[in-house]
Amino acid sequence: MAGGIDGEISKLRHRDVRERRRAVRVLFDTDIPRALKGFVPLLNDKDPWFRSKALDAHRRWAVAMGPEALESLAKHRSIEARRCAANLLGDYEEDVSKIALMLVEDEDLTCKRQSAAALLASEHASEHVGKFLSDEDPYLRRLAVASHGASESNRRDGLLDPNASVCEAAVHALTRNGEALDEASVLRLLELNIEGTALIDAAIELDGPALIELAKHAKGPALKHLVKALRAACTSIDDSQIKTLLKAEQYVVLGRWLQGQRSEEMDQLRWRLLRESSVDSIERSRWLERLLGRCSEENLVTEARVFATEDHPNLLLDAAHNLSTAFDKLES
């Protein structure tokens, strides 16, 4: 077999293009990594088909043949060859920093980014973080703050980056490492319209201006996440975060937080919020509609009947009437 493989490798230089193509097929089918050496000269072949097969051979066997197999690619004049080398860096368990350092200086953005990723994922990542944190490419700065080689100071510096995606990466990295966000950082990130559970959790824990600001502007999924996190953190209207939001008149968040929860104190707050004309009537009617599941509670229905005698939009009066009617049907 050894002689056969060597024979096929030698045929890659055959004058007859048909023999060369046949040798390529045989070597790929045999799938023996040392066949890679025969494909290196094909990187310079005039025929684009052979050049593409040379790149395919490197993609298939370069990792098995060790970091040295990438050198011919990394030093090649062809951008396709250098990109191939850069894309393979992350597949090596061995140290490929020598080649990565070569490619990171390449003017091609793909080569630079892929080699930077390899360096920042290596055992010596901390040696390279500073270089990429100051790079003009936000992608590289984002990789740097997310790297295990970054320090807490690096991550906090990332919160001040002019690019929002870098700030977001810094938030995730700080959270991953159990490092708390401060009030000023959360407020700045909210101004940049950065969202996420990490910011929400931090705002709730800080229980200050950031929580109020988040409640003011949260919509859609962000609002749902805020309410969910608030329910996990607060179980009583006496919890400080609930008092903070109540004082700041963040009634929509509080009304949604109350959904599904019951106690005498919570019901008192619920009816208070239902009477808040500053809250959209559609929002308040939904709160009332969700009380239908409690239509057997006489105290609740009594409150609904009182509510129905007051001056409210018809949408709310109809919802209160439905709650009362549901109780009457249970009684009959």
Image (spheres, helix red, strand yellow):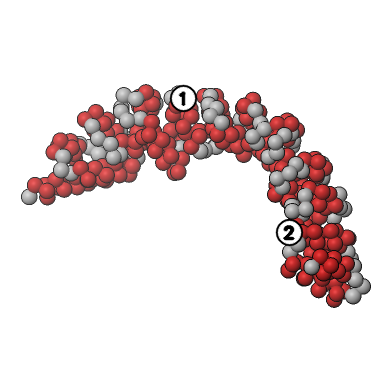
Disc ID at residue 60: 2
Res 49 visible: no
Above or below, 239 relative to 91: above
User: Would you say 85 lies left or right of 260 here?
Assistant: right
Residue at 53% over, 29% down: 178
Q: Determine the image quadrant of residue 216.
A: top left
Q: Position of residue 73 (x, y in %)?
A: 83, 52
Other-residue count near label 1 (Cα within 10 Å), few / some / many at <14 / 14–19 / ≥20: some
Q: Nearer the viewer, residue 230 or 48?
A: 48
Residue at 31% over, 35% down: 258
Q: Earlier in the sequence, mark 2 or mark 1?
A: 2
Instruction: Give the amino acid at mark 2.
Output: Arg
User: Would you say 184 lies left or right of 148 here?
Assistant: left
- Foreground mark, 2 or 1, reads 2
- Distance (Cα) linking label 2 and label 1: 52 Å
Q: Does dot 1 land on a helix, a strand or a loop?
A: helix
Disc ID at residue 206: 1
Residue at 70% over, 36% down: 123
Instruction: Give the amino acid at mark 1.
Output: Leu
Q: Position of residue 160 (x, y in %)?
A: 63, 29
Above or below, 32 relative to 161: below
